[in-house]
Amino acid sequence: MGNYKYNPKEIEPKWQQCWEKHQSFKAEDNSLKEKKFILVEFPYPSGAGLHVGHVRSYTALDVYSRLLRLQGFNVLYPMGWDAFGLPTENYAIKHKIKPQQATKDNIEKFKKQLKSLGLSYDWSREINTTSPSYYKWTQWIFLQLYKKGLAYKHKMPINWCPSCKTGLANEEVIDGKCERCGAQTEKKEKEQWMLKITEYADRLIEDLETVDFLEKIKMQQINWIGRSEGAEITFNIEDKEVKVFTTRPDTIFGATYLVLAPEHELVSEIVSKEQKPAVEDYLDLARKKSDLERTQLQKDKTGVFTGAYAVNPATKEKIPVWVADYVLASYGFGAIMSVPAHDDRDFDFAKKYNLAIKEVVKDLKDSQKQDDDLDSTFTGEGEVINSDFLTGLTTSQAKAKIITWLEENNLGKKTVNYKLRDWIFSRQHYWGEPIPIVYCKKCGEVPVPEENLPITLPEVENYEPTDTGESPLAKIASFVNTVCPKCQGEAKRETDTMPNWAGSSWYWLRYTDPQNDRSLASKEKMNYWLPVDLYNGGMEHTTLHLLYSRFWNKFLYDIGIVPSLEPYKKRISHGMILAEDGRKMSKSFGNVINPDDMVEKYGADSLRLFEMFVGPFSETIPWSEQGLSGCRKFLDKVFNYFYDFRETAFSESDLSEELLTLLQKTVKKVGEDIKAFKFNTAVSALMILFNELKQGDNWYFYSLKDMKKIAIILYPLAPHLASEVWSFMEKDNKLEKVAWPQYDDKLIAQEKINLIVQVNGKLRATLTVEGDIEESQAKQLALKEEAVKRQLEGKEIKKVIFVPGRLINFVV
RNA sequence: GCCGCGGUGGCGGAAUUGGUAGACGCGUUGGACUUAAAAUCCAAUGAUAGCGAUAUCGUGGGAGUUCGAUUCUCCCCCGCGGCACCA
């Protein structure tokens, strides 16, 4: 033992080449086997190379895929590159090379790293979002969206990142900061391409019921879409109408004033002469505030009276109209009816500016509360009071009745609002898919005919982003100037490009048929492979890529391209790997672990095994090099075991029943745990097996048939080592083609058990007995135990609880 | 503030139709081998008391249900993630 026979540097490349040569992991398009499409989010090939976090999720799905193949499934486990985007563009600018070249170099590096880990991808299906043969279809999908009116151009204030020099989608702004670089975003008025994701808002919520996603993923998406049911109500201000949205139309009798957002178009029209200077000052101030300032100062609400009055359609009373920036222009109608008695924000505002507060809902649970107690709000459901024909109803009854009343009197209607905004789809950068639209002086906006796709990115020297918000493509005359597809006259191309999320919004489809040049993928192949059976990716993509791609899939389903309503059947998420110091791995902390170094030092199988063993797959976990070294020690032991077995010429030794049963249990557990993504306990089951097989410096060996079983159950986790030791025992069949072993349930059931003996629920002894022992017999044996006798001395047994196969408990 | 998840040794974690808490790994301590070290192997390792058998305590805190609670119920504390002036 301990002679360093295990040399991963030698055996790992050997088996990797063998797999590549035999195309061992090629997924069959026409197979009688049941298919499984296993997908992990494809990486952005950055200059930094692979992260140990990539290794974690890729290995987990690799382990899973390898198990499924041995269990007789036709598995598609593909890999590709999501390569458009800013980091590459910035890197290329800095190093004065073309993004095309940088991407090629980075992909090469990533691919080499992935191969060194022995991941069982079907490399024949590799895709790259920046290759024209791929983005041709990204552009094609855009044209289909355009045809259906789901892609439209719109001028509006958008989030602008001054550091990245581009507009951003709402999903890309976190706490007022750019998701990528952390810079404070600004508002910029720009004409933008938009995708109507809001059209799919309801279906994106409802169809979550049909898929198996982690609950927190569903909750986050539902939250983000933010559906609320309520009513729109029209208020009259003199001869003008203003619409408000409310989720509490039942409180309309308590609406004591209206508030318009500073951007509301009616503000300038209704403002009175006296109030005009004050209102204008306020609008100026609001304009200067960033979104962040507006939301961070939420405790201190500000506003100003317009001098105008509206009529509450329910009470017919005149109520003042205010302007305040706690009302957002972008939600609902940018105007609200304010019910200070039953809304915290309205309450704060009314208190500050001494506005009327009128209670219209009684809290049935709190009878103590006086009707005239106006120190706090009640925002729950209760009984309606002070509300004419609504009085006495419950909140939900009142909602229904007032909506009917509003509709009958043409004052409003039931309606639904969403927090979700349409997807801002234009970016002012070079390294993205050109948007296939041209502008003709005569014909206006004209989509590029499908047969002219792809519109390829021109390869140029200078592609730096501008500060003006104009795309760098605008400076490239050969690209911009074109002819109108309709009238053949002079025309200019759209120069904005698509966001980096475009290519990933349909990429899984392409894996089913990656070389197709007539359609994004053939019907037949999509019908066979889709939907994706298992999809793993990061939680950070829940309201970005995951939502966008569900939207595109639904659209493609609607126009008859893809066969399934949802793209992914099941979605799981891996936890992050932190540095050993418990902080995030980052260059600035100098605590980044490079997987290449770990493969070099410990071998790929050790790294794989460790990342599976380190903790539950979905949990955040700190790195531990000592833990990795422990896994290497385990594999040394495993290798030596099989090596010694070979040396001893397949001798058989006497094996106890326990060891025979243990093997059965281990086969069962490893298979079940991998299927349940409990990789850590699968590894520990293997460790337990080997601990038991060892007696000092000697080993217990199983029969050749059982030894092979051990190699097979090691294979998903440590495929190189398993293949090597398999070759000691079997020359004809390849390990990656054998069947996963059956286990013997009967043997497991026959096993002797430890029967627990308790007195008053406290453990006093354990008995090793047959699993099917009877109560009377167990009682007899238990009462012979010294410790039990001592506890029972001088006491009366009141009750005996016997749980077959588990315990016997004496109550005294 | 709202929603979701979690809190178990020195550390990562195991165990929940309620039934041996701490599997497995790391670390630590002692021992074997060695001139020595590394590696390897053996043993111990939740806390307290005891030479020991053993006893008591112990899964964030408090209460409850139960013969028996890490697991179920109620209240509270802490941590993480998401949303957040969305009417």
Image (tube, rainbow, N blue to C red):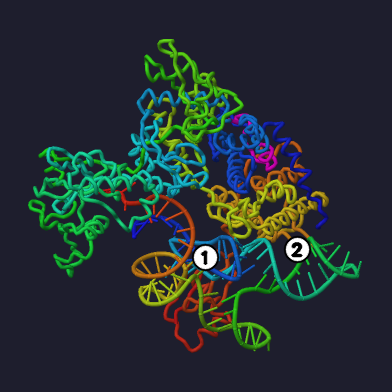
Dividing the picture into quadrants, the one containing residue A333 is top left
The residues colored magenta run A111-127
Q: Amino acid at mark 2?
A: Gln
The residue labelled by disc 1 is A805
- Say which of A625 and A592 sits in front: A592
Residue A41 at x, y percent in the picture: 54, 40
Judging from the image, what secondary structure is the residue with disc 1 in?
Answer: loop
Left/right placement of residue B35 relative to residue B80 reads: right
Q: Amino acid at mark 1?
A: Gly
Give the mark nearest the N terminus, 2 or 1. Answer: 2
Q: Residue furthest top?
A: A488
Left/right placement of residue A535 relative to residue A152 reads: right
- Say which of A321 and A608 sits in front: A321
Residue A98 at x, y percent in the picture: 63, 30
The residue labelled by disc 2 is A695
The quadrant of the picture occupied by the N terminus of chain A is: bottom right
Dividing the picture into quadrants, the one containing residue A284 is top left
The reply to whether the magenta stretch includes residue A117 is: yes
- Say which of A8 and A261 sits in front: A261
For mark 2, name the chain. Answer: A
Can you see residue A377? yes
Residue B58 at x, y percent in the picture: 51, 75
Left/right placement of residue B45 relative to residue A209 reads: right
Instruction: Give yes or no for contact between labels 2 and 1 (Cβ–Cβ under 8 Å).
Output: no
The quadrant of the picture occupied by the C terminus of chain A is: bottom left
Left/right placement of residue B69 relative to residue A349 reads: right
- For the point 20% across and 67% down, the residue is A366
Can you see residue A454? no
Q: Mark 1: give few (<14), some (14-19) or many (20+) Cα within 10 Å.
A: some
